[in-house]
Every structure is written in C-alpha cells, then in structure tokens.
Amino acid sequence: MTYKTGGILIENLRKVYGHGDTAVEALKNVNMQVSAGEVVGLVGPSGSGKSTLLKCLGAIIEPTSGRMTLGDEVIYDNGWKIPDLRTLRRDRIGFVFQAPYLIPFLDVTDNVALLPMLAGVPNELARQRALELLTSLDVLHRAKAEPSQLSGGEQQRVSIARALANKPPVILADEPTAPLDSERALSVIRILNDMARLAQTAIIVVTHDEKIIPTFKRIYHIRDGQTVEEKGEGRSLE
Amino acid sequence: MTLGKIREIAVLKLIGTHNVTIAAMIMQQALGLGVIGFVVGKVAATIWAPVFPKFVLLLTQDAIVGFGATMLICALASTMAIRVALLVDPAQAIS
C-alpha cells in the first residue's frame, strides 16, 4: 500500500534498551504506514514489542534509530525533530486507553474541552468543539454529567471524543475494547472507523481481542520486535 | 488523594498536560479542602461554644490568622503531593 500524507509513516524504527552485553533489542527495523482515514490493527503476543512500539509512536520514549512522519512532518529522524514532546502529544496524537480515565472532577464537556483549552483555544470555542464531538458520538445528552454517572460504553465514547478534540492526524488506541462485551466492542470499532473517515485521522488499534481482529482491513502482526503486514478480513460492522 | 490518582495523572501527562497545570490542579484542590475545613470548623466552633464551660475570646483577627495558617499548612502539604505527581511517568497510562 502506498502511504498517503496525513497519517503516520514509520521507517526502520529500532529501540534498544540497555547497553553492551545487557542490551535488549525490543524493536528491530519496524516499518508501518497508516493513511489518513484508515484504521489498522496492531496485534501480537505479550513481550512482542507492542507496548514499546506504542510508546515510541506516542512520543513517550525515544527510539534508538529510524524515522517517523506524522501528518506531513518528520517528527523523528534518528533524534526528535520536535523539541516539546508534550505539546506534540497534546496537539498531534490522540490516545484512547483500555479504561477511559476521564478526569473525575470535570463534567463530560470539560473532559473533552480540556485539551483544546490547554492548547490555547478560547474556552467557549473549546466547549463548542466538545459539544460537536459529543453529538457525533451520540453522548450529547450526557454533556453535563460527571464521568462516574456514565456507563462504561458512554465513558469510552467520551474518551474517543477527547482523543479527537485537537483534531490529531493520528490516534493510538491501546486495547480499547478489552473490558467490553462483543456488542459494545464492535460498537467502539464502528465509532473509530466512522471517526477516522469523518476526521481523516489515522487510527492504530493495539489489541489481542479476538472479537474485533476480523473487522480490520489491514493488520500489523508484531513478533520479536518485527512487524509483518497482513490483509485482514475487513468484516462488515453493519 | 494524589496517590490514589496516579493513573489519571499519568494520563494527563501523556495527553500533553504541562507540569505547571497539574501542580495548579493539586494546589487548588488542597486549598479548596482547606477552605471547606476552616468553614466547617468555624461554624462548628461558633455553634458549640456555649456548651463549653470556659469562655475563650476569639476576635475576628484571630479567625483571619487561623484562616491564613490553614491555607499555608494546606499549601505546604500539597507540595508533597505535587512532588509525587511530577515524578509520575506518563508511560504508566499505557497498559
């Protein structure tokens, strides 16, 4: 597949922990490409390098070598090209976690509006953007509720809205369906596909959830620090 | 309270919240609790004072000093929580 700009491109990414005799090569020349509007699965057994790759993609840890392009900009080329990684994560990368981890003392709207506010968007505009996202994710009726008053599925939808709030070119979803039953898990994947298409965001779903793996059109298998691309079943979500 | 929210703090850091913002949130919470504690204490003391046999005269100035001391203690106590929060690794948010 040819990489279209706007998503994420990973070239020859390596990560080595430690030095000398104790060095462990967690990632070995990983290559991935996810275009804007596309959802791909990243699957692999425990210890395969999944978490390390996710941390590198999320600018949480520094790779040892390689190149990463986010949107149209090279962010890593044998060294970070962006000095402020927090701002990079805030503005250019969305995160969806296994549990929603919403801020308990903020209502649903402010949980979503928080990131644009931190990015300097005026409060009213940030809240308006949050309400638009809550509308598209069908949780607008819970806009004033506190996270503890929401069901698990609603909380996960709010966390997806939060990930989209700053219109990032890429979203990293870390086991987003693990605690959900089949119906809710497929609903989350349906939402991620809809949002990827609507917001033209590249979404990488790290998972070992057998319920959702058949829904991906493309899958990267990671084993012993190396990725292999495979065509997925792309099972219909209707 | 902060130690019970390590994962949330890791998430805040991971999604790009700066340390100053996190520190301000913790300080705000500590001072808020201080205000609530002071008001509850002051109201309770006023209500219960007649029940006690000894009369202690507390002037408005004493209350102001007491309030200031409460805020100072809360602010100092929050620095410990802030220190813990700033040491949280954002990678802890990843499963």
Image: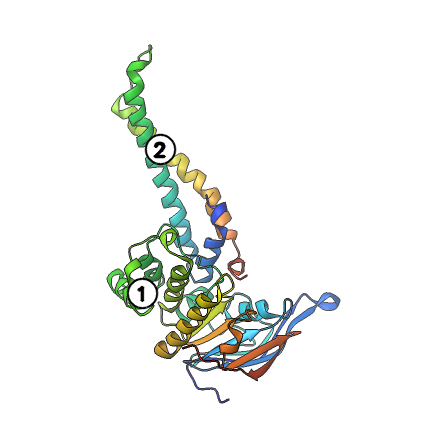
Q: Residue A45: x percent and y percent?
A: 63, 70
Q: Residue A57: x percent and y percent?
A: 52, 72
Disc 2, SS:
helix
User: Does residue A13 sit above or below B57 in this rendering?
Assistant: below
A117 relative position to A219: left or right: left
Between A6 and B20, the residue placed more toward the observer is: A6
Chain under callout 1: A
Chain under callout 2: B
User: Does residue A2 sit above or below A175 in this rendering?
Assistant: below
Residue B51 visible, this angle: yes
Disc 1, SS:
helix
**Identity of the amino acid at label 2?**
Gly
User: Does residue A150 sit above or below A56 in this rendering?
Assistant: above
Write the residue at 49% across / 89% down.
Answer: A2
Write the residue at 49% across / 77% down.
Answer: A215
Dot 2 and dot 1 within a common chain: no
The residue singled out by tag 1 in the image is A134
The quadrant of the rendering that contains the C terminus of chain A is: bottom left
| Number of residues whose C-alpha sits closer than 10 Å to that of mark 1, classed few (under 14), some (14–19) or many (20 or more) | many
| Number of residues whose C-alpha sits closer than 10 Å to that of mark 2, classed few (under 14), some (14–19) or many (20 or more) | few
- Image quarter of residue A27: bottom right
The residue singled out by tag 2 in the image is B37
In the displayed orientation, state which residue is furthest to the top. B53
Foreground tag (2 vs 1):
1
Write the residue at 52% across / 64% down.
Answer: A178
A25 relative position to A99: left or right: right
**Identity of the amino acid at label 1?**
Leu
